[in-house]
Image (cartoon, rainbow, N blue to C red):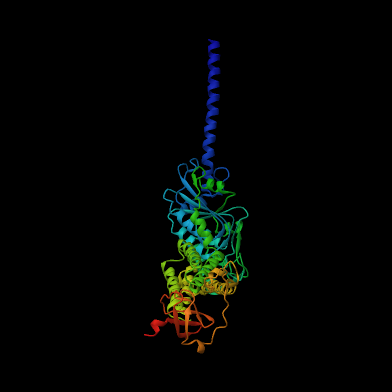
């Protein structure tokens, strides 16, 4: 019996020991879960899973107010989808188009994260991206990693939540225009417009509008931050202190872990070849070259009709220009119609109404207006008020001026070059085995030429060359087609245009 009692006592002690250890473990685990919540209720920071940020309950509530209810920490957002969109390099219209296309595919997306690293770019592209983000029903997060300068700052401010990486910077958004390869300040009206965009964007997301304005206008004063002498650029600490940023995360995984979405599926949109092409075509330099080459090709074709190649190249270049701007919603059918009307007016001036008159001037103005509206990236009302429309017109005029000089160079070089001489009509010694170019004597005066009869050297379609005595003269008919060797008579001279008519028609 003593032995039995001793054994039973030992078993009881062992059981009690195991029970005590188990109870302590359960209690410790319980306290480990409850204690942080208790501290949170008192305003102390709570650490979310390892790698995330320290947030107190008030900060967490603010995040959920902006982003909606977030998953529980232990779930990690399994079954959810997060879209991670890269905003890198230059902000251009191709990137804007890429973003807007990607945002149309967010039906099953819980959160859109913009991974931002940019020194800025086109204001019109940033405004398009800002509008697309603010119209989106899905919550958005801007991760400034490591910088969001100029246009990048506006994109960041349009998101529901801003997260900064250690050492990040955001701001310095004064608009400039590039002329002659140098950046120069824009008109004060344009600064005022952009300042309003920054303020309204920031305030719509519950941020300080004055801080946003100071990023654009160096005259804005923000107490304790900037004195109105320089543009404002916030570092990570200042962005957090002044409630521009919501929290700090060392990298993207840490950001997702803070939001309890570290186990969510990540979707990274891929740019399509057409969007890459659009980014190339809407580059200001490329766009200017396309305008210049396009107008040069059409001018050469009008000067020497029937060749085909210059006109084809011109149409293709203008087509590529309008394709890029049409895809980015800068150009519409109105701009294309204006340019087409301008080209028709120029053709009428050359073929139907000889002389440089009303039709030619109207054609150039119409073409310039259509191209200017195509490169203009702002609403027409804003563009007029801020003077941005004149910047667009200047850009187009520079491109057209380049076309004019290139055309004059063509007129000088083409007849002398064996590579381009085929573009210029020449008189050949008919039937000779050794064709030689015949150099005509000087052109007669207008008084001598008026009423003279001559012979068409080549087909007049309706322009070409006719011989009057020993002189070869560039002539144009009233629109009719005249075959070579037909006798013609000069009936009118307007400026540098000599108008002829077939002899049989002139005699009736």
Q: Residue furthest top?
A: 1
Residue 324: x and y in percent read 48, 62
Residue 190 spot, x, y in % from top left: 53, 72
Answer with left or right where residue 279 lies relative to residue 136. right
Instruction: Residue at the far left: name it.
Output: 508
Nearer to us in this view, 297 or 497: 497
Looking at the rendered structure, the number of numbered marks drawn on it comes to 0
- Which of the two residues, 51 or 275, is positioned nearer the viewer here? 275
Q: Is residue 20 above or below residue 465?
A: above
- Residue at 54% over, 17% down: 9
Vertical comparison of 30 with 145: above or below? above
Residue closer to the observer: 394 or 340: 340
Percent coordinates x, y for residue 229 in the rendering: 63, 70
Report the side of 294 relative to 137 (left or right): right
The quadrant of the picture occupied by the C terminus is bottom left
From where the camera sits, is residue 357 visible? no
Q: Residue furthest bottom?
A: 447
Q: Is residue 303 visible?
A: yes
x%, y% of residue 95?
A: 51, 58
Q: Of 65 and 113, which appears nearest the observer?
A: 113
């Amino acid at each position: 019996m003593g032995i039995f009692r001793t054994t039973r006592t030992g078993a009881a002690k062992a059981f009690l020991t195991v029970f005590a250890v188990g109870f302590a473990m359960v209690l410790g685990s319980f306290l480990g879960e409850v204690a942080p919540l208790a501290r949170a209720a008192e305003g102390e920071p709570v650490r979310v899973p390892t790698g995330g940020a320290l947030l107190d309950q008030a900060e967490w509530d603010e995040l959920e107010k902006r982003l909606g209810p977030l998953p529980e920490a232990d779930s990690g957002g399994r079954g959810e989808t997060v879209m991670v969109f890269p905003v890198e390099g230059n902000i251009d219209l191709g990137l804007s188009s890429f973003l807007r296309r990607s945002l149309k595919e967010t039906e099953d997306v819980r959160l859109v994260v913009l991974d931002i690293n940019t020194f800025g770019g086109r204001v019109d592209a940033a405004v398009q991206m800002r509008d697309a983000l603010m119209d989106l029903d899905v919550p958005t997060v801007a991760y400034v990693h490591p910088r969001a300068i100029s246009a990048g700052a506006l994109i960041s401010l349009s998101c529901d939540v801003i997260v900064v990486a250690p050492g990040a910077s955001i701001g310095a958004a004064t608009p400039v225009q590039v002329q002659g390869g140098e950046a120069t300040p824009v008109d004060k009206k344009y600064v005022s417009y952009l300042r309003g965009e920054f303020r309204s964007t920031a305030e719509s997301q519950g941020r300080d509008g004055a801080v946003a304005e100071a990023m654009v206008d160096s005259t804005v004063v923000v107490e304790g931050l900037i004195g109105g002498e320089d543009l404002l650029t916030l570092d990570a600490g200042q962005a957090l202190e002044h409630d521009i940023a919501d929290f700090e995360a060392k990298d993207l995984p840490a950001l997702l872990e803070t939001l309890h979405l570290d186990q969510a599926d990540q979707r990274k949109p891929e740019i399509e070849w057409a969007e890459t092409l659009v980014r190339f075509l809407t580059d200001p330099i490329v766009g200017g070259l396309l305008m210049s080459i396009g107008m040069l090709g059409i001018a050469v074709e009008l000067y020497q009709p029937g060749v085909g190649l210059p006109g084809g190249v011109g149409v293709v270049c203008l087509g590529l220009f309008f394709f890029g701007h049409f895809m980015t919603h800068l150009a519409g059918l109105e701009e294309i119609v204006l340019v087409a009307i301008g080209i028709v007016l120029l053709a009428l001036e050359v073929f139907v109404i000889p002389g440089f008159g009303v039709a030619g001037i109207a054609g150039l103005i119409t073409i310039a207006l259509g191209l200017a509206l195509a490169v203009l990236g702002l609403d027409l009302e804003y563009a007029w008020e801020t003077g941005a429309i004149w910047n667009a017109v200047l850009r187009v005029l520079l491109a057209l001026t380049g076309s004019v000089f290139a055309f004059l160079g063509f007129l000088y070089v083409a007849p002398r070059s064996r590579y381009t001489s085929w573009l210029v009509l020449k008189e050949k010694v008919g039937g000779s085995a050794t064709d030689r170019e015949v150099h005509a004597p000087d052109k007669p005066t207008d008084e001598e030429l008026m009423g003279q009869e001559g012979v068409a050297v080549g087909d007049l379609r309706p322009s070409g060359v006719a011989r009057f005595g020993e002189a070869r003269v560039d002539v144009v008919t009233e629109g009719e087609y005249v075959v070579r060797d037909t006798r013609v008579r000069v009936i009118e001279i307007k400026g540098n245009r000599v108008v002829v008519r077939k002899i049989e028609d002139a005699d009736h």
